[in-house]
């Protein structure tokens, strides 16, 4: 089978492949008008009609069609067109062959690099810090959806109401003690705070003491205390403090 | 208690070898004999002597660490026997998944470089921008000045030589040795041209 004698029937050209190439090389036929796919189809059909695969013919065809395609491709790029147009057809063919050869050599060099890469596959070396392989996702054992539902149900339940009872401090109003102390002073002019506070809770004692301070601030009473932690004696304002002997028992004994 | 007499004194080259060992284990790229000589404060010929000693000691089959002469210098690497274990732990981002286009571009730059992206595109017939950018990112090529037209030119890096296990670029096979059918293509096209009707 001779590729050059392949009969073509294209829109732009009718005749043997050889003649097509010649016309293209002589610029008597525009490469852009040549339907290369049609040429390929014609060749493949011819090839399919044969019992044996003609590798020589295939190779030859590929080279010729490759050259044709390259011519066509260059035709499509204006700046390249000038370059090739300067050459006569023989030189253009030569130039194309040169480029094809250059590319083929580079392809072979790339093939050599690939082989080399494979041969050197077992050479490990340090490149700065060696990047670690990402860790594989840990396998999780098969899970029961019901178990998940149960777990979620537990989370979705309303939590028990939190008691705030311990935070509410209950104490009587200060005014209650104010009135009580005023009433007391109307009767007695003076009294001993500890006696009055005896039997009250801690909170009530504190409030009673606040009431005492309140009265002192208002200038209604005078407060006496012989020393730290000794009894507190309260006088109505305007009365004189006692200086009698018997009063010393307040100061010392009940500390 | 008295120490036994050392009958064999350690040779100075042996000491130098130890220093070189230390330098190589810290380095993350190949060190030239000159680099080593400067660091070890010794002369190059003695460094080469010591390197020969190391090459013998750190050889395939004898040690898990192998000293190799690559990319114009000397470097430690794992022994080939340990490759499988290494593969389980270490990634190889530089060489993994190099495409055919990347290999062809590398070949153009390795053989014809320094050359620009248009040069690569002219030979391969397709634009090379993204492929070149990818190779730069991998560290296999780097910028190397500009051509007359102002286009950036590229050349391969020492890492390229290291990854491909080359002592230098001159270790690449000659393009002519790679195959012999180029002339045939030329002949056929010439024959075809001659067949043209006058």
Image (cartoon, coloured by chain):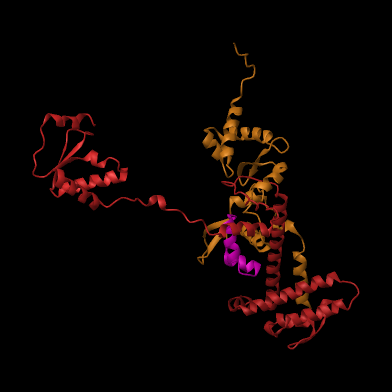
Chain colours: A red, B orange
By secondary structure, the bulk of the magenta-drawn segment is best described as helix
Q: Nearer the viewer, residue A142 or A211?
A: A211
| Residue B154 position (above or below residue B41) | below
Q: Which of A48 and A18 is in front in this view?
A: A48
Quarter holding the N terminus of chain A is: bottom right
Q: Residue B174's quadrant in the figure?
A: bottom right
| Residue A92 position (above or below residue A169) | below
Query: Which residues lie in the magenta part?
Result: B116-140
Q: Where is residue B163 in the image (x, y as percent from the top left)?
A: 64, 50
Can residue B197 be spotted in the picture?
Answer: no
Q: Where is residue A163 in the image (x, y as percent from the top left)?
A: 45, 53
Residue placed furthest toward the right? A51
Whether residue B139 is in magenta: the answer is yes
Q: Which residue is drawn at 55% across and 56% down?
A: B142
Can residue B27 be spotted in the picture?
Answer: yes
Q: Which residue is drawn at 72% across and 42% down?
A: B81
Q: Where is residue B43 in the image (x, y as percent from the top left)?
A: 55, 33
Whether residue A37 is in magenta: the answer is no
Q: Which of B161 and B24 is in front in this view?
A: B24
Along the horizontal axis of the image, is A231 left or right of B164?
Answer: left
| Residue A22 position (above or below residue A218) | below
Q: How many labels does the image show?
A: 0
Q: Residue B5's quadrant in the figure?
A: top right
Along the horizontal axis of the image, is A78 left or right of A9?
Answer: left
Q: Residue at x 52, y 36 (%)?
A: B39
Q: Which of A20 and B160 is in front in this view?
A: B160
Residue placed furthest toward the top? B1
Quarter holding the C terminus of chain A is: top left
| Residue A173 position (above or below residue A246) | below
Along the horizontal axis of the image, is B125 left or right of A243?
Answer: right
């Amino acid at each position: 089978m001779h590729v050059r004698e392949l009969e073509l029937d294209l829109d732009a050209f009718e005749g043997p492949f050889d003649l097509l190439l010649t016309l293209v090389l002589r610029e008597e036929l525009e490469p852009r008008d040549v339907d290369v796919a049609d040429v390929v189809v014609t060749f493949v059909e011819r090839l399919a009609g044969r019992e044996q695969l003609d590798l020589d013919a295939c190779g030859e065809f590929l080279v010729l069609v490759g050259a044709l395609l390259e011519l066509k491709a260059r035709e499509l790029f204006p700046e390249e067109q000038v370059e090739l147009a300067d050459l006569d057809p023989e030189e253009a063919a030569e130039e194309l062959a040169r480029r094809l050869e250059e590319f083929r050599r580079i392809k072979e060099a790339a093939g050599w690099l690939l082989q080399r890469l494979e041969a050197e596959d077992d050479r490990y070396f340090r490149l700065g810090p060696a990047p670690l392989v990402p860790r594989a996702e840990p396998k999780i054992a098969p899970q029961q959806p019901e178990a998940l539902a149960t777990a979620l149900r537990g989370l979705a339940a309303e939590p028990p109401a939190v008691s705030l009872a311990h935070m509410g401090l209950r104490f009587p109003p200060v005014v209650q003690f104010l009135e009580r102390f005023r009433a007391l002073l109307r009767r007695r002019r003076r009294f001993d705070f500890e006696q009055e506070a005896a039997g009250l809770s801690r909170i009530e004692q504190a409030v009673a003491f606040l009431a005492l301070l309140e009265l002192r601030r208002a200038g209604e009473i005078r407060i006496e205390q012989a020393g730290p932690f000794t009894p507190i004696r309260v006088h109505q304002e305007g009365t004189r403090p006692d200086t009698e002997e018997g009063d010393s028992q307040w100061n010392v004994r009940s500390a | 208690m008295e120490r036994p007499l050392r009958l064999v004194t350690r040779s100075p080259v042996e000491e130098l070898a130890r220093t070189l060992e230390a330098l190589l284990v810290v380095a993350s790229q190949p060190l030239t004999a000159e680099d080593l000589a400067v660091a070890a404060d010794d002369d190059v010929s003695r460094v080469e002597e010591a390197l020969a000693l190391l090459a013998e000691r750190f050889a395939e089959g004898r040690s898990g660490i192998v000293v190799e002469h690559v990319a114009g210098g000397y470097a430690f690497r794992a022994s080939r026997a340990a490759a499988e274990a290494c593969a389980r732990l270490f990634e190889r981002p530089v060489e993994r998944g190099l495409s055919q286009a990347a290999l062809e571009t590398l070949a153009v730059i390795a053989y014809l470089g320094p050359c620009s992206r248009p040069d690569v595109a002219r030979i391969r017939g397709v634009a090379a921008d993204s492929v070149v950018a990818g190779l730069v990112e991998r560290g296999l090529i780097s910028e190397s000045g500009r051509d007359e037209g102002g286009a950036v030119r590229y050349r391969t890096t020492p890492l390229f030589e290291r990854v491909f296990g080359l002592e230098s670029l001159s270790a690449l096979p000659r393009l002519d040795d790679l195959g012999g059918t180029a002339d045939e293509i030329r002949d056929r096209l010439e024959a075809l041209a001659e067949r043209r009707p006058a």
